[in-house]
Image: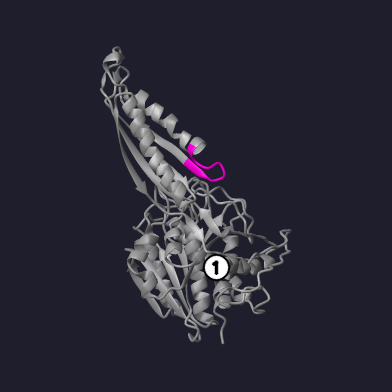
Amino acid sequence: MRAAWLTSPGSFVLLVKAHPSGREQSTRGRSSMPNTDRIAALKEEITAWRRDFHSNPELLYDVHRTAGIVAEKLTSFGCDEVVTGIGRTGVVGVIRGRSTGSGKVIALRADMDALPIEEETNLPYRSKVPGKMHACGHDGHTAMLLGAARYLAETRDFDGTVVLLFQPAEEGGGGAKAMIDDGVMDRFGVQEVYGMHNMPGLPVGSFALRPGPVMAAADRFRIHVEGRGGHAAKPNETIDTLLVATHIVTALQSIVSRNADPLESAVVSVTSFKAGEAFNVIPQTAELLGTVRTLTPELRDLCETRLKEIATTVARAFGATATIEYERGYPVTRNHEAQTEFAASIAAKLAAGASGTVDLNVPPTMGAEDFSFMLEARPGAFIFMGNGDSAGLHHPAYDFNDDAIPVGVGYWATLVETAMPAR
């Protein structure tokens, strides 16, 4: 199946006809839409939740305040189940439709953690916690999924079950994997899973996604170089670890330029170089830190192999030794084709009402996302939603755009009601 559309503002033509499972994919397949007036009426309240999260950022798994508020609100909305402590501090909410005869179970995910960044805004709701801020929009993601939970719990206009996944530790902690390792997919019978992330620079009301790799695998390495230290006036009596390490840095750049297929994408970056503390001492050791980003398993294997070979052989050529620690992090975020087509059709409905567009061929980004673990566990799709003309992600001046809230809530509600239409 292929989808195509006109991308001028306000115009959209979706050509996809049917999902392989028999679920209707055409935007004409279901004439009804969620109660947009009700969703719009919730915006002010959801905005207040979002700004409260923004003012009180928490890192990694230490999201006890945020998770507590999420669990409290899910309970107050009347969710059928609210479970805490999944993946250490994750929260799961379950909402059953007015009927569940379809047997369908769809999960929606939001991340809750912030970043170790000092905020540089003058917003009235700026971070109250020194050195921490919501610089990636997880405050908005959490608030929008809470808004969708409230709407879905009120209306229950679907046949099936929605599982709401509020995840800790996306920013480097692998919270998605922790929830999966705790059995979240099997325990709640999840069949498909969907995620969403805001995208600065993309207009509010617009969406972007692609089938296949949409975000990169992210690995990291530490190279410890051991030479022979000594007096800087007698370099001939030393094995200069600085010289060795700089040659390793240079040689590592050949992995992308001379080993990787030019039509594939890879990034090898050395991001830290630590050696010596004195003007007149050649240090005994040096340490390099860095990251490797790839979009295919084959290229991931190649980069790891070549990095280890290059570091050890370059060091040996100078009479030094190199010890490499290579840690595989988040895998490639790979969208499943059928679910991506379906997500695009849902996005089209929202974009049409907001003079937006849907790009189903957005270039992959070499950033990483631990929703990749969920897409390895279940079929699904990860979509980008416009955040407008804001500062970039992970920037100290970033802020989530509250005007995007009705669009995000509407996307979740439309997805559920379209995937599991009420009987």
Q: Answer yes or no: is residue 185 visible.
A: yes
Q: Is residue 262 magenta?
A: yes
Residue 11 image position (x, y, % from top left): 73, 64
Going by the numbered disc 1, the residue's amino acid type is: Gln
Secondary structure beneath dot 1 equals helix
User: In the figure, residue 408 lies in which quadrant?
Assistant: bottom right
User: In the figure, residue 251 lies in which quadrant?
Assistant: top left
Left or right relative to 351: residue 178 = left
Applied colour scheme = one colour
Residue 126 image position (x, y, % from top left): 48, 52
Number of numbered discs overlaid on the protein picture: 1
Residue 269 image position (x, y, % from top left): 45, 38
Q: Say if 339 sits above or below 226 in the image.
A: below
Single out the residue that lies furthest toward the top: 233
Look at the image and give the residue range highlighted in magenta: 259-267
Q: Say if 273 sits above or below 98 in the image.
A: above
Residue 252 image position (x, y, % from top left): 43, 34
Q: Quadrant of the N terminus?
A: bottom right
Q: Residue at x 58, y 78 (%)?
A: 22
416 or 193, nearer to the observer: 193
Q: Is residue 281 magenta?
A: no
Q: Quadrant of the C terminus?
A: bottom right
Name the dominant secondary structure of the magenta segment: loop
- Return the residue at label 1: 339
Q: Answer yes or no: is residue 49 visible.
A: no
393 or 109, nearer to the observer: 109
- Label 1 Cα crowd, 10 Å radius (few <14 / some 14-19 / many 20+): many
